[in-house]
Amino acid sequence: MFKPKTIMEPFRVKVVEPLPMRTRQERAVALQEAKLNLFSVHADQVTIDLMTDSGTSAMSQEQWAGIMRGDESYAGGRSFFRFADTVKQLTGMEHIIPVHQGRAAERILFTTVGGKGKTIPANTHFDTTRANAEASGAEALDLVIEEGKDPSAEHPFKGNINVLALTKVLEERAGSVPLVVMTITNNSGGGQPVSLENMKQVRAVCDRFQVPLFLDCARFAENSWFIKLREEGQQQRTPRAIAEEMFRLADGAWMSSKKDAFGNIGGFLALKDDALAIECRNLLILTEGFPTYGGLAGRDLEALAIGLEEVLAEDYLEYRIRSTEYVWRHMDQAGVPLLRPAGGHAVYLDARKFLPHVPSGLLPGQSISAALFLEGGVRACEIGTVMFGHTLPDGTQAPGPMDLVRLAIPRRVYTQSHMDYVIEAVTYVFERRAQLGGLKIIEEPSALRHFTCGFEPIGWDPYAP
Ligand SMILES: *Cc1c(COP(=O)(O)O)cnc(C)c1O
């Protein structure tokens, strides 16, 4: 029987979008104007944009057809009910609250249950999750397993939470823990999955202390696929059956539907608890919109409902996870230091090993991101000291837990030859790594600094040919 090795995209192209093809000189000007912050670079200077997989998916013909069917009624629109029914079936939760993106759900939830003196444990909080928990006055605790903190450690489920550490936190502070968060997959920890077994253990601990469990489920389908591939006894199950089981272990969930729902915008908060749902809906009306649209157009809800079904297709998930692994494997073979193993939505460069001569305080991940853009027009995202560290009173940097550069792969957007180009660009920068130096922050906002801060090179000229 013919068993192809080629990882073929299970779709073909119907509409094309030209890629911006720029010169190194044009990019040098853009990078200088952006003060070396890739968030400030105009997208028309970027050839391959791997800054994020959020909101960057290609929608299917069914989703575009759904856009035309969208019902824009202010209250009780058809598209809302289609969306709510889809999410209810998937999650088994009664209350489905649409929001314009994941962080709006976080803001509503943590405004309701967070506050000063509260502790919110997670495997790893995503940046907006941490920021929203902290903005409410609560403490955000990351309790991922030890392997999850070591980029080179091999473990099939590096997103798992340390159950002993969680138990200890709940023993000491159960009364002030409003909920436990499991991020699936663990985005800030390298797109690493959480096992069903770990979720079941966490459920049991939560039951023991009567604390609700919430899933931050932006990549629930990718997590389900990893469980099918890697967890004992799960090989015969469908990703849908696994996803439904994960959600039924939880009391609530929120999703940035800009990820595994193939949406360009959108999200939801799903809840079992009636009283909490009333409180959250009241806040929703205040800032997002009426509960049957939550800041989205009816057409968005329609497209998301379709995307949430499409993402669980086995041929898609197999292609998705294998093609990310393809990029990872080729970079690994070229000797590029990577977070191991490959994540679901992204390949992460290990910046501390990539630039051993640049200490964390001099932001090695940001230097690599700048060089990748300058040389190849590839835009990546630093997930390290810029994102998770902070400036100390003496002006030096407290490092983040890891220094990573994330190459996030938009869904159904780039082909294998685009990825071959990215592999070449990363390898080129790696071979010239000795010429790269560090950076310092010259302007900094008070929260989520990575989005808007500016940088200056320290002792090197990033623009030198
Ligand atoms: C993207 C993301 C969020 C925030 O969602 P937005 O839609 O960007 O507001 C929260 N948690 C995780 C795990 C994410 O990946």
Image (cartoon, rainbow, N blue to C red):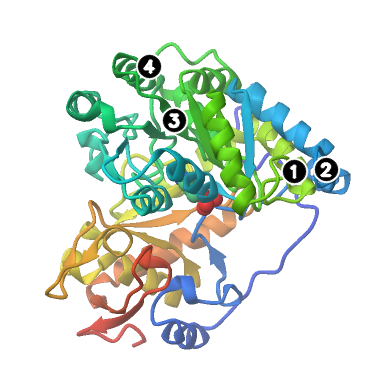
Question: Label 1: how many residues lie within 10 Å, few (<14), some (14-19) or many (20+)?
Answer: many
**In the structure shown, which secondary structural element does the residue marked by tag 3 occupy?**
strand
- Which amino acid, mark 1? Ala
**In the structure shown, which secondary structural element does the residue marked by tag 2 occupy?**
helix
Give me the C-alpha separation between circle 3 and circle 2.
Answer: 30 Å
Who comes first in sequence, dot 3 or dot 2?
A: 2
Who comes first in sequence, dot 1 or dot 4?
A: 4
Instruction: Tell me the tag on residue 303.
Output: 1
Residue drawn 49% across and 22% down? 246
- Which amino acid, mark 2? Gly
Name the quadrant of the N terminus.
Answer: top right
Residue drawn 68% across and 50% down? 289
Position of 329 with respect to 270 (left or right) is left
Instruction: Tell me the tag on residue 66.
Output: 2
Between label 3 and label 2, give the one nearer the viewer: 3
Instruction: Tell me the tag on residue 200.
Output: 4
Between label 4 and label 3, give the one nearer the viewer: 3
Q: CB atoms at circles 1 and 2 under 8 Å apart?
A: yes
Give me the C-alpha separation between circle 1 and circle 2.
Answer: 6 Å
Who comes first in sequence, dot 4 or dot 2?
A: 2
Who comes first in sequence, dot 3 or dot 1?
A: 3
Who comes first in sequence, dot 1 or dot 2?
A: 2
Residue where numbered disc 3 is placed: 214
